[in-house]
Image (tube, helix red, strand yellow):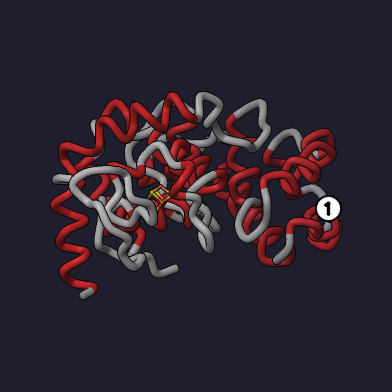
Amino acid sequence: MARSYIHEARRRVGPKRERIRPAIERLALEHPDAVIALRFRDPLELLVSVMLSAQTTDVTVNRVTERLFRKYRRPEDYLAVPLEELEADLRPTGTFRQKARNVRAAMAMLLEDFDGEVPTRLEELVRLPGVGRKTANVVASERGATQGIVVDTHVRRLSQRLRFTRQEDPVKIEADLKRLVPRADWARFPHLLIWHGRRVCIARRPRCGDCVLADLCPSARVDPGPPVGSAVPSPIRT
Ligand code: SF4
């Protein structure tokens, strides 16, 4: 039953290569305000903000960095205070000891290897302690040097529900998306999915009845119209 339903759902919505452009266009109309929610004024603040955003909310990071960035303006400033002082300044963001160690080590490497400047190449960014591929992609994209597609929890969930990927591993998901999404949309695509994931395609209870992608989505819990005409069980697993 489930297999035949999934097959029918895929047949109804068509191949992903035909769905990707209308999906992006609709999401762009639906979420014209879909941009990064972190507040920063320069590449260093961007890097630190994204490093602090792991396992917390953007609202919390913005609240912490409002004061943090008045105190720490250059890489040297993060190294000029005792580790315990930086830990206390980062405490509200959670896992603050690890974050403080990573930020200090990243600042030291910026000074040592990059003349104090935040690099834009992914392979250089991921050398910085505490900077994984997702963080590197965010930093590069926000600086206009997009080289990949950011895959966070929302991008992963929506890409899977929309059957843009079958992968679980973020690196493999990104590879699938890079083959599918037009190059010009690599920077805005994750923002569109992130905002749609927060507002509509919510993890536990997707609001398919309010979703502009319902007729393009094999996981839709609503009947978007012909050729599906009868109630069917949901294939969504969250
Ligand atoms: S139709 Fe439902 S599952 Fe598909 S993207 Fe929209 S909210 Fe998510």
Viewer-proximal residue among 100 and 157: 157
Measured from the top left, where is residue 119 in percent x and y? 47, 36
Q: Which image quarter: residue 47?
A: top right
Disc 1 residue lies near ligand 1 with CB under 8 A? no
Q: Which image quarter: residue 82?
A: bottom right
The image shows residue 132, relative to residue 168, as above or below, that is above
Residue at x 41% of width, y 57% of height:
157
Q: Is residue 164 left or right of residue 142?
A: left
Q: Which image quarter: residue 110?
A: top right
Q: Which residue is mark 1?
A: 89
Q: Quadrant of the C terminus?
A: bottom left
Q: Is residue 159 left or right of residue 175?
A: right
Residue type, numbered disc 1: Asp
Q: Residues within 10 Å of mark 1 (few under 14, many from 20)?
A: some
- Judge whether residue 126 can be spotted in this image: no
Q: Quadrant of the N terminus?
A: bottom left
Residue at x 27% of width, y 57% of height:
230
For the residue labelled by badge 1, is the local secondary structure a helix, a strand or a loop? helix
Viewer-proximal residue among 19 and 112: 19
Viewer-proximal residue among 208 and 177: 208
Measured from the top left, where is residue 228 in percent x and y? 22, 51
Residue at x 21% of width, y 56% of height:
9
Measured from the top left, where is residue 39 in percent x and y? 68, 33
